[in-house]
Amino acid sequence: MNQLQAKVTKIQGTQGLKIVTFHCANTSLKMMSLDLQENIHDKTVVQLTCKPTSIAIAKNFSGELSYANQLNAVILSLELGELLCSIQLQFTTFTLESIITADSASRLRLAVGDEVTALIKASDLSIAKVIS
Amino acid sequence: MINIKINKTLHGANGDMNLDVVFDIKEGDFVALSGKSGSGKTTLLRILAGLEESNAVISVGDTIWQDKNTNLAVQKRSIGFAFQDYALFDNMTIEKNLLFVANDKKLAEKLLNITELTELKERYPSRLSGGQKQRVSIARALMKRPKILLLDEPLSALDSTMRTKLQSEILTLHKEFQTTTIMVSHDPSEMYRLANRVIILENGKIINDGSPKKVLLKTKGSQKFSFEGELLEIKKVDVIFIAIVAIGQQLVEIVISQDEVKNLQVGDRVNVSTKAFHPIIN
């Protein structure tokens, strides 16, 4: 499971809907959520998670994307299947897995050592557990 | 306010258990009481009704029903009781079943009307369906205009359509008669629809108490869509894995990665969850 340790820096809310901002390593992350557990406040440290299939990859990208979470990462390894490709990414001290189609992986000519951007929608990011 | 304090040792199938609860109920509340079988739910209702001996302290408004010096008899407690098995008088017509409790024809008429039994009032219980019998049982429980209505899994023997219909009738009666209702139930949708408070008992103790949403909504972290299930199989497909999980009466498939597979074993009890943003309702 993808795991990122992050600290809550801001909680914006309206009628049970929340946007939570986190600080994770050198990056700001955002999560869309309904009501939060009662023990989650500003400065709470949590473990964030995201399914590998919800992480998209951009390479040499210029332009604007709506993805609230854009993580600069390096490709550690690639496992190319018949239809899908599993990519291990190094993001600061964390390792993340992204699963994309094999076609996309070859279209981007992804290789070990590539600097890429891992893209996660705010609605795909979730809190796995509260750390402190 | 209704104040309840009960301490009683029960001799159950799994050895002795101490039913030990202290709680207050606001008058007019609809409280759902839930928990595994043997957790003390029915005993709690029976103690409230005075059907079971106990060292309880029970007061309803300004009246003490039970304490060290007082122990009101069943018929002196302002209680209506309906059970899962109806417990009707088979030798009396429906109307007589109601009038036997209190000889108030006008009230009986009103109750028969709300529960849509007016046309069947001359029938005997043996000629009624399960849903109709339970309606009679609930209507009869209200014949004394009780302060507290106790319902012990009244709808669990009925099919889901009949259950939904009776749920709305129970709610109508609860409001119309301004009773305080305590209902034992195992059905989360029923508790959510009817109750404004849910109390969960386990081994004779209250382990959860709050609004239906707070008590019943299964969440895990920020995941609002969460189910317990049993892991039946893990299949490798391409670079991913597909887990088959039995949840209730259904099987579901979940895509997982190599990394997630490491901590899983077929037969495990697992929690399957996702964010509230992903599921699609049809």
Image (cartoon, coloured by chain):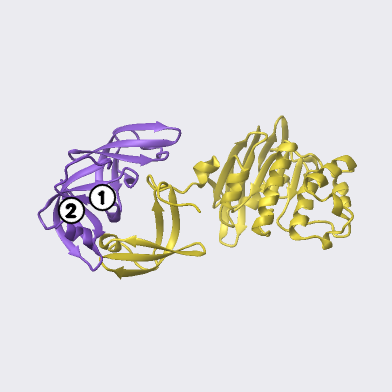
Chain colours: A purple, B yellow
Image coordinates of residue B273 in percent, x first then y, are 40, 53
* Apparent side of residue A88 relative to residue A126 in the rendered image (left or right): left
Q: Farthest residue in the top direction?
A: B62
Disc number lying in front (2 or 1): 2
* Apparent side of residue B247 relative to residue B36 in the rendered image (left or right): left
| Residue A3 - label | 1
Image coordinates of residue B28 in percent, x first then y, are 67, 35
Closer to us: A122 or B32: A122
The three-letter amino acid code for the residue at tag 2 is: Leu
Q: Residues within 10 Å of mark 2 (few under 14, many from 20)?
A: many
Tell me which corner region of the image, top left, top right, bottom left or bottom right, holds residue B246: bottom left
Tell me which corner region of the image, top left, top right, bottom left or bottom right, holds residue B66: top right
Residue at 64% of width from left, 35% of height from top?
B3
In the displayed structure, B56 sits above or below B229; it is above
- Whether residue B132 is visible to the viewer of this picture, yes or no, is yes
Mark-to-mark CA distance, 2 and 1: 12 Å
Residue under circle 2? A89
Residue at 73% of width from left, 58% of height from top?
B85
Image coordinates of residue A93 in percent, x first then y, are 16, 47
Q: Chain of mark 2?
A: A
Callout 2 secondary element: strand
